[in-house]
Image: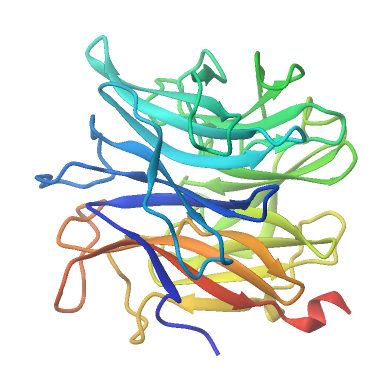
């Protein structure tokens, strides 16, 4: 049975959003997210906030309780968004994120990484992932050959428009080289997730924000540690209410995709036995949770990220906004708002046993 309320509220703030979760070498769960910090905002909190920062909260008990948040990065006059942490083989924490800022009378974006060598207590200097106007959603990948890969994309602020990009480091994240992937027919592929499914073989699953085909995810593939990629092909995963980005994980050796099947309403998990990763088992998806018991859309939500808890369980983090402030003039609540709710939430999900038979 699907849940309709979170197992835990990880953080409640002004407009927290876009969380990520991972487990470190000490068994701790690390949840990173962006907090808006603009207490007097009247417009959409998807908009630029010069006081926004990237935060980290930690759980020592598999997600039951969480620490007070600490700062990962807070650049001056920048909106530091979408922090996503990975653990490198030397136990360094490497977080990708992007900054939004105002420069030369226009808004710009910059995808970056920042590292911690003391388990997240302090963080070093940021390193840019590209010279382009870029953003990032998903965490860096520590590849089997020692390289580090980050799935970035050219941002909406760029005059050239959205396109998926790959950024690779061969020196443990000190320097980076980027390249473009092919786009979908809509020319609107942006946020994407990547996963190394076997040594050197990476798959990417992409969000499409165009008018044509935007209700499906697209798949790309690399056989050379992310240096070259196939042209995108449409998967059979269809979403509703406009797409949000998926996340990819291995669970007991099987690829799992966590995504919002109905944006602002619900989140599901899905797997596949198709080694092309184009045809997913949509008839046997796991409906993880709805945001409301009445199944109505909330104001803003749907950037789920999941982490392994046990052979039969995963923990999903998400953000949930029920507010009079919406991300778009087109977003209007269809129910009476009793109380503002702006949270990072957590759900403990049982993984279907028949996925691993």
Q: Residue at x 66, y 33 (%)?
A: 92
Please provide percent x and percent y for residue 315.
Answer: 58, 67
Whether residue 318 is situated above or below residue 18 in the rendered picture = below
Quadrant of the drawing holding the N terminus: bottom right
Q: Is residue 162 left or right of residue 329?
A: right
The picture quadrant where one finds residue 291 is bottom left
Q: Quadrant of residue 98?
A: top left
Residue located 80% across and 76% down the image: 355
Which quadrant would residue 221 be assigned to in this image?
top right
Nearer-the-camera pick, 350 or 223? 350
Q: From the viewer's side, name the closer residue of 166 and 210.
A: 166
Q: Please give the name of the residue rendered at 50% of the width and 70% of the height, measured from the top-left corner.
A: 64
Residue 12, position in %: x, y?
Answer: 29, 60
Residue 61 located left or right of residue 277: left
Residue 213 shows up from this direction: no
User: Does residue 320 appear in this view?
Assistant: yes
Residue 166 position within the rendered picture, expressed as x and y whole percent measured from the top left: 66, 28
| 207 left or right of 271 in image | left
- Whether 64 is drawn above or below 147: the answer is below
């Amino acid at each position: 049975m699907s849940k309709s309320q979170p197992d835990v509220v990880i953080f409640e703030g002004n407009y927290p959003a876009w969380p990520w979760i991972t487990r470190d070498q000490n068994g701790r769960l690390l949840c990173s997210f962006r907090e808006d910090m603009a207490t007097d905002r009247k417009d959409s909190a998807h908009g630029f906030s010069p006081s926004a920062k990237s935060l980290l909260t930690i759980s020592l008990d598999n997600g039951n309780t969480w620490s007070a948040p600490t700062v990962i990065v807070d650049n001056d006059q920048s909106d530091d968004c979408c922090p996503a942490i990975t653990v490198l083989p030397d136990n360094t924490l490497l977080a990708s994120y992007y900054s939004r800022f105002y420069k030369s009378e226009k808004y710009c974006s910059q995808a970056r990484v920042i590292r911690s060598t003391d388990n997240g207590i302090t963080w070093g200097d940021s390193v840019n992932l590209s010279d382009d106007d870029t953003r990032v959603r998903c965490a860096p990948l520590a590849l089997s050959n020692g390289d580090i890969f980050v799935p970035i994309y050219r941002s909406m602020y760029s005059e050239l428009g959205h396109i998926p990009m790959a950024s690779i480091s061969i020196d443990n994240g000190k320097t980076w080289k980027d390249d473009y992937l092919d786009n979908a027919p809509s020319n609107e592929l942006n946020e994407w997730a990547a996963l190394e499914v076997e040594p050197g073989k990476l798959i990417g699953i992409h969000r499409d924000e165009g008018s044509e085909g935007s209700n499906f995810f697209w798949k790309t593939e690399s056989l050379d540690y992310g240096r070259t990629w196939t042209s995108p092909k449409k998967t059979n995963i269809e979403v509703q209410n406009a797409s949000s980005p998926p996340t990819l994980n291995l669970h007991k050796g099987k690829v799992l995709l966590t995504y919002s099947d109905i944006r602002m309403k619900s989140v599901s998990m899905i797997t596949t036995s198709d080694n092309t990763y184009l045809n997913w088992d949509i008839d046997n998806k796991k409906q993880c949770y709805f945001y409301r018991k009445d199944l109505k859309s909330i104001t803003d939500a749907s950037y789920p990220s999941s982490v392994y808890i046990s052979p039969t369980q995963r923990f999903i983090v998400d953000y949930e906004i029920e507010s009079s402030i919406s991300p778009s003039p087109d977003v209007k609540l269809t129910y009476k708002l009793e109380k503002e709710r702006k949270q990072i939430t957590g759900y403990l999900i049982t993984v279907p046993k028949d996925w691993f038979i």
